[in-house]
Image: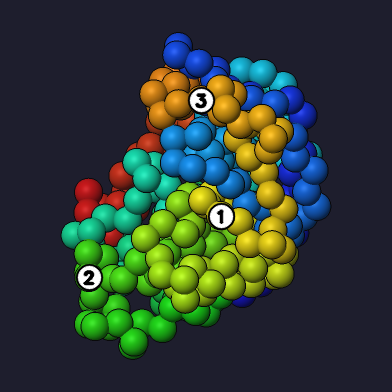
Amino acid sequence: MDSPHGAAVTAENFGLKGPRGWAFRGVRVDAEPGTLIAIEGPSGSGRTCLLLALTGRMRATEGHAEVGGLRLPKKLAAVRRITGLGPVTGVSELDPALTVAEHLHERALLQRRFDGSLRTLFKPRAERAAEARARIDAALDAVGLALDSLPKGPRTSVRDLERLEALRLSVGLALMSRPRLLAVDDTDLKLSDTERALAWELLRSVAAAGTTVVAVCSEAPDDALRVTAAGDPADTAGIAGTTDAAADAADAAADDVADADKTDETDTTDDEKGADDALAEAGRA
């Protein structure tokens, strides 16, 4: 699948503090476009908060970062527009009640509504359908997900997918927006050694195609650029934060982002109506 140029990622003394302590602190990153970046650490160490902060979904409280030349925490909305989320618990999870085809169709409709020009919206239906089909096929090919290999083909429900199949679907959906940076949470969760190797092979292929990849994991592969939520790998105790501290920081940062979005010129009533229209057309309003 054709990919835009990846986003360079840099960070200096990057941190996020909540009511009960630091979710992460002192993070330093220097990654070229198309790099595979692994945020390594145990569950509850603030690694997901760092992932969301680097993609503009949370507001850092210390230091700064840049993604694709966009400075954080100032340019949250702009960073969100060039980044895509794969599976992130509580943020971009797949709906277990929907089929694979429904997820793909819905995402194609949303991409047409928000990524296309006004002229695109008025193209003949057959032409729009062909473009959506081409985008879906390219995404599936990029993640190696063959629909005919699934138990019920494209009509397979998400709840019936294996963990690795669900990961491929989530990444494929994210790639449909052609992001410059792809973020994936819990990359190696509940995977066998063989499946874990295949998951990293998938993310390497995305990075090799030009998209920068940031993946949360418990153990990073040797060829990835390793980052810890504590910043200094030798000083993780008492800095990365407990599960409670990370959760509190996530809540506080999410509130900050929500407040900032109220004044963001891109978050308009027309956009919300457009999302409702696209979801209704997909059959899940």
Residue 242 % position (x, y): 45, 26
Query: How is the model colour-coded?
Result: rainbow
- Say whether residue 263 is visible: no
Residue 30 % position (x, y): 80, 43
The residue identified by callout 2 is 160
Q: Nearer the viewer, residue 36 or 206?
A: 36
Q: Earlier in the sequence, mark 3 or mark 1?
A: 1
Q: Nearer the viewer, residue 65 or 21?
A: 21
The residue identified by callout 3 is 241
Q: How many marks?
A: 3
- Answer few, some or many: residues within 10 Å of disc 1's Cα (few below 14, many 20 plus, some between 14 and 19): some
Q: At x 57% / y 27%, what residue is drawn?
A: 237
Residue 148 occupies quadrant: bottom left
The residue identified by callout 1 is 219
Mark 3 and 1 residues: CB-CB less than 8 Å, in contact? no
Residue 137 % position (x, y): 48, 78
Q: For mark 1, give the secondary structure.
A: loop
Q: Nearer the viewer, residue 190 or 267?
A: 190
